[in-house]
Image (tube, rainbow, N blue to C red):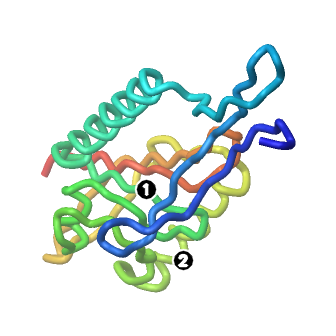
Amino acid sequence: MATRAAIDTIEANQSPEGGNMFVHVIKTPCWTRAARSTGSRDLLGCDERKKIEAQLAYERDLLRSLLENIPDRIYFKDVASRFIRCSRSMAARLGLAERWTWWADRFRFSSPEIAQGYYQEEQRIILTGKPLINKLQHAVDAEGRETWSAVTKVPVHNRHGNITGIVASRAMSPS
């Protein structure tokens, strides 16, 4: 209050369960005409915050519906080409639990030669920002059946324009 400066910070707090939680805090002094501080207030009003929260919840629900129901194999990877999230159909193909969101690398699910090819392809996308669109790929599934798929991999950008990983889709051909 003495400096009359606004505060915009992330504060670490303890949750009721004892874990860490982080709170975005924005405060600015409120002054009277006589230049006395009357306290502080949050710059982002509750109405606007609720609208933003509702929009984020809606987008989360859309993503969840897509990942739970689409037959195409969709997955997200970070800049190190580690899986961070995938569709139910991709999880089933990899032999994982339905709600799979943990980190793993491609080398766990493919032969070293195939995995290295995927890794190099993904790193090229991450480094250049150039997507791979509808590349026809041959594969053999766990039961020895041959499959073909059209693979698309595109970079994921954050709000600052930096590439934070990739999202990919394998559109499976009819058997």
The x and y percentages for residue 39 are: 65, 34
Front of the two marks 1 and 2: 1
As displayed, is residue 32 above or below residue 24?
Answer: above
Quadrant of residue 54 within the rendered picture: top left
Which amino acid does the dot numbered 1 rest on? Phe
Q: Quadrant of the N terminus?
A: top right
The x and y percentages for residue 145 are: 17, 69
**Residue 107 image label:** none
Answer with left or right where residue 171 lies relative to residue 33: left
Please name the residue shown 72% across and 33% down the image: 29
Q: Element type at marker 1?
A: strand
- Judge by depth and name the residue closer to the eye, 97 or 38: 38
- Judge by depth and name the residue closer to the eye, 65 or 7: 7
Outermost residue, top side: 33
Label 1: which residue?
A: 76
Mark 1–mark 2 distance (CA, rounded to whole Å):
17 Å
The numbered mark, 1 or 2, whose residue comes first in the sequence reads: 1
The x and y percentages for residue 21 are: 45, 63
Dots 1, 2 in contact, CB < 8 A: no
Please name the residue shown 46% across and 48% down the image: 135
**Residue 116 image label:** 2
As displayed, is residue 3 above or below residue 73?
Answer: above
Answer with left or right where residue 155 lies relative to residue 37: left
Please name the residue shown 39% across and 34% down the image: 53
Binning the other alpha carbons within 10 Å of mark 1 as few (below 14), some (14 to 19) or many (20 upward) gives many
The x and y percentages for residue 107 are: 44, 82
Binning the other alpha carbons within 10 Å of mark 2 as few (below 14), some (14 to 19) or many (20 upward) gives some
Q: Element type at marker 2?
A: helix
Please name the residue shown 37% across and 48% down the image: 169
Which amino acid does the dot numbered 2 rest on? Gln
| Number of numbered labels in the structure image | 2
